[in-house]
Image (cartoon, helix red, strand yellow):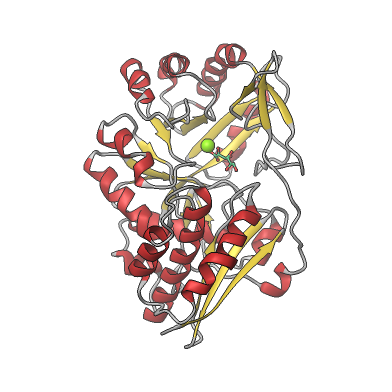
Amino acid sequence: MQIADVRVITSCPGRNFVTLKIVTDEGVYGIGDATLNGRERAVAAYLEEHVAPLLIGRDARRIEDAWQLLYRGAYWRRGPVTMRAIAAVDVALWDIKAKAAGMPLYDLLGGKSREGVLVYGHANGADIEETCDEVERYIGLGYKAVRAQSGVPGLDKPYGVGRGQMFYEPADAALPTETIWSTSKYLDHTPKLFEALRDRVGFGVELLHDAHHRLTPLEAARLGKSLEPYRLFWLEDVTPAENQEAFRLVRQHTVTPLAVGEIFNTLWDCKDLIQEQLIDFIRTTVVGAGGITHLRRIADFAAVWQVRTGCHGATDLSPVTMGAALHFDTWVPNFGIQEYMRHTAETDAVFPHAYRFEAGLLFPGDTPGHGVDIDETLAAKYPYDPKQLPIARLEDGTMWNW
Ligand code: GCO
Ligand code: MG
């Protein structure tokens, strides 16, 4: 089974997505996601100019060899552009293999470890009251786990509070929107949010929160400690993790579970975090970390240290990544939770998919492959519309982490 055609499809059905389609000489094709929010064209060019020529004529069944070729063969390793390109090829090849075998991908990976995939939705509001109302709305929709982010008094456009209710779309302008950040205002406010939430909804629902890389290790430790009475499922990205050892300080001070990894590309980015048991959940997903082939290695490594998975699932991860991640989640023994931000109706129409939500769980469906396709004719009606993520500055103008 040889690779006959490799196509990169860039489209904006509500937001931008880069999709890879690999077609074999036997007619079976596979789909992969290569979207890198705000930097889409870099991955598209990497695939078109440097990867596609290497794939034509290769045996589509040799997934591992293709992965090693693209990883080792580039000489320049890791990084979000390279690893997303590798992920797109890898996921498309797993899709082809599973379709050729007539199996849903989870079967090829080793079969179901669970019936459904626990997901968390995103509730956000301008203030504590509105956020509590939104969390209740998610509970009403059947969610068993909800991430809560709220506006902070005195801060315009804090992270996680956006337009639209069922999803939050941060990449909102051709040039980055500037936002202002104050750690002290945020740290004073956030425990009040979770106190109000537990008063309102009790302890029967899992609550999560994302600090989005804004805090120093000591500030992160303080936040974790102050949230302990509200028993969060996890506290995410409390401090940037380029320096993995930073988490040791956080860990020494709090038993609030920690999640990190949506911006990691390989096992090398989380090796110390995992083996030193500095985190509880690893957030990498298929498109972020080199596809099924590499994510599986991360998950197996994490299992040794009782670290569970919590795949990134924001709207910038296309339905293709969601489909592949759900098959992965259905198989992976050390599963924790899956993030689920709904896509718009236009996105869902361009990517027909087999997965479905029911009573707080997502189900990948039983279609052979990962169960997500692309309607290329419809995709062509939505031309690329460049958008970037916001940036954050401190109140005195200092550039900060968004
Ligand atoms: C999350 C994330 C996202 C990112 C987004 C950037 O936890 O869902 O932090 O909302 O900000 O994926 O493109
Ligand atoms: Mg996050």
Q: Is residue 115 visible?
A: no
Q: Quadrant of the N terminus?
A: bottom left
Q: Is residue 171 visible?
A: yes
Q: Quadrant of the C terminus?
A: top right
Rendered location of residue 127, percent (x, y): 68, 22
Task: Classify 8 as above or below 264.
Answer: below
Task: Classify 103 as above or below 191.
Answer: below
Q: Quadrant of residue 20?
A: bottom right
* Side of 27 where 178 appears, left or right: right
Which one is nearer the viewer's eye here, 213 or 242?
242
Question: What residue do we see at 58% from left, 11% from top?
Answer: 184
Question: What residue do we see at 46% from left, 34% from top?
Answer: 205
Which one is nearer the viewer's eye here, 24 or 370?
24
Question: What residue do we see at 52% from left, 28% from top?
Answer: 213
* Side of 348 where 31 appears, left or right: left
Question: What residue do we see at 62% from left, 65% from top?
Answer: 351
Task: Classify 330 as above or below 4.
Answer: above
Q: Quadrant of residue 45?
A: bottom right
Q: Quadrant of residue 267?
A: top left
Rendered location of residue 221, percent (x, y): 41, 17
Task: Classify 149 as above or below 388.
Answer: above
